[in-house]
Image (cartoon, rainbow, N blue to C red):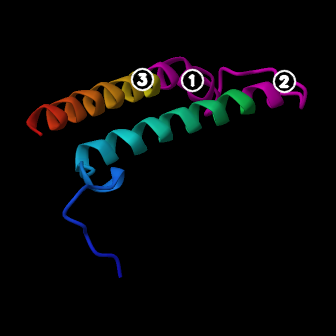
């Protein structure tokens, strides 16, 4: 069991992780992973003989990386900005 000293604090216990941070993290990670998987599916489908990307689920698989990847990176940027602002406010309060 660890005990807290009165002299200082460790880097991990100064700012708690909020729910919105977790939500943005998992949303951005999910969107980026799904986009990359769809991208590789399209790349691997062409040598396997799929020539018609206009039927079935192919239009969604082809278009999803075009929208989900930029949204995922925008969520990562928003998460970074929120983190920097929160840490700046915490440091000013000390």
Which numbered disc covers residue 46? 2
Check disc 2 and report its element: helix, strand or loop.
Answer: loop
Decide which of tag 3 and tag 1 comes sooner along the chain: 1
Front residue of this view, candidates 65 and 24: 24
Q: Residue at x 54, y 17 (%)?
A: 66
User: In the rendered view, would you say 37 is above or below 85?
Assistant: below
**Are there few (<14), some (14-19), or many (20+) residues within 10 Å of tag 1?**
many
Q: Which mark is residue 65?
A: 1
Does the magenta run of residues contain 31?
no
The C terminus is located in which quarter? top left
Q: State if disc 1 and disc 2 touch (CB < 8 Å).
A: no
Assess whether mark 3 and mark 2 are in contact (beta carbons under 8 angstroms).
Answer: no
Corner quadrant of residue 34? top right
**Image position, residue 79 (x, y; %):** 33, 31
Crowd around label 3: few <14 · some 14–19 · many ≥20 (10 Å): some
Front tag of 3 and 1: 3
Left-right relation of 64 to 14: right
Position in image of residue 6 (x %, y %): 19, 64
Q: Earlier in the sequence, mark 2 or mark 3?
A: 2
- Residue under numbered circle 3: 71
Q: Secondary structure at mark 3?
A: helix
Residue 46 covered by magenta stretch: yes
């Amino acid at each position: 069991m660890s005990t807290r000293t009165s002299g200082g604090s460790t880097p991990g216990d100064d700012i708690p992780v909020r729910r919105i941070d977790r939500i943005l993290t998992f949303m951005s990670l999910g969107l980026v992973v799904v986009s990359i998987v769809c991208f590789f599916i399209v790349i691997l489908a062409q040598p396997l003989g799929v020539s018609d990307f206009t039927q079935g689920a192919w239009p969604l698989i082809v278009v999803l990386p075009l929208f989900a990847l930029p949204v995922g990176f925008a969520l990562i940027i928003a998460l970074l900005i929120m983190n920097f602002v929160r840490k700046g406010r915490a440091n000013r309060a000390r």
